[in-house]
Amino acid sequence: MPGFIEPCDPTLQARAPTGSDWVYEIKTDGYRAQVHIRNGRVTVYSRSGYDWTHEFAPIAKAASQLKVRDAIIDGEATVLGATGLPDFQALRRELRNPESKRLIYHAFDLLYLNGNDVRRASLLQRKQALKSLLQAAPPTLMYVDFLEAEGERVFAQACRMGLEGIVAKRVDAPYRSGRQDT
């Protein structure tokens, strides 16, 4: 199983891409985090590859309950504020609280599963495997579903709701580290 994997980062665009080969996810305001599970031992890495397992102890504890030998999950650690939307300042206050009930891990991609590097698989294949993995997960771990709709409408609705934005992803794209336009 590989160590920390450099995240795949979206490229900022003025308009959402359109077409049936794109799906959309809600962008949450939090800390990017990569969850590594190896034979029941969990390590949570920050976007830069630092071991933040202590800072995200509730996420690590929840991930240790997954029925999997080994996995690497990409996602975002968040805390919902009084408005019901992710609140970055509230998240900062919850860090290092091993008993936090407010910390949520929004899992949006699966990179490795039980001896298989799945980064070459399509986004839709990885999402299906992630959804199956998280089906009986503790509530701290939340599967991020995608929307199949017109990108501009999804973006407009996200703006009306006061969300940070959307992330458009090509359904057939593999997971590639670094800045991407897919």
Image (spheres, helix red, strand yellow):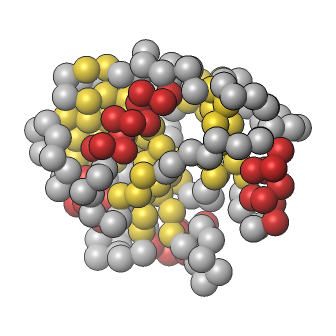
Image coordinates of residue 118 in percent, x first then y, are 35, 22
Which residue in the rendered view is the most extreme toward the right?
14
Residue sitting at the far left: 39
Quadrant where the N terminus is found in the figure: top left
Quadrant for the C terminus in the image: top right
When asked about the image quadrant of residue 121, the answer is: top left
* Residue 98 coordinates in the image, percent (x, y): 29, 71
Q: Position of residue 60 (x, y in %)?
A: 27, 55
Tell me what residue is drawn at x 42 percent, y 27 percent.
125
Q: Indicate the quadrant where residue 168 lies.
A: top right
Q: In this view, does 147 lie to the left or right of 130?
A: right
Most foreground residue, 15 or 99: 15
* Res. 46 visible in picture: no
Query: Which residue lies at the image location 71% right of the left edge and 43% below the top edge?
Result: 149
Q: How many labels does the image show?
A: 0
Q: Taking 86 as reference, is 99 left or right?
A: left
In this rendering, would 180 be left or right of 14? left
Residue pushed farthest bottom? 82
Q: Where in the figure is residue 158, as x and y percent of width and height?
A: 75, 58
* Viewer-side residue, 34 vs 113: 113
- Residue depicted at x 22% and y 41%: 37
The residue at the point 31 percent across, 28 percent down is 112
Q: Can residue 95 be seen in this view?
A: yes
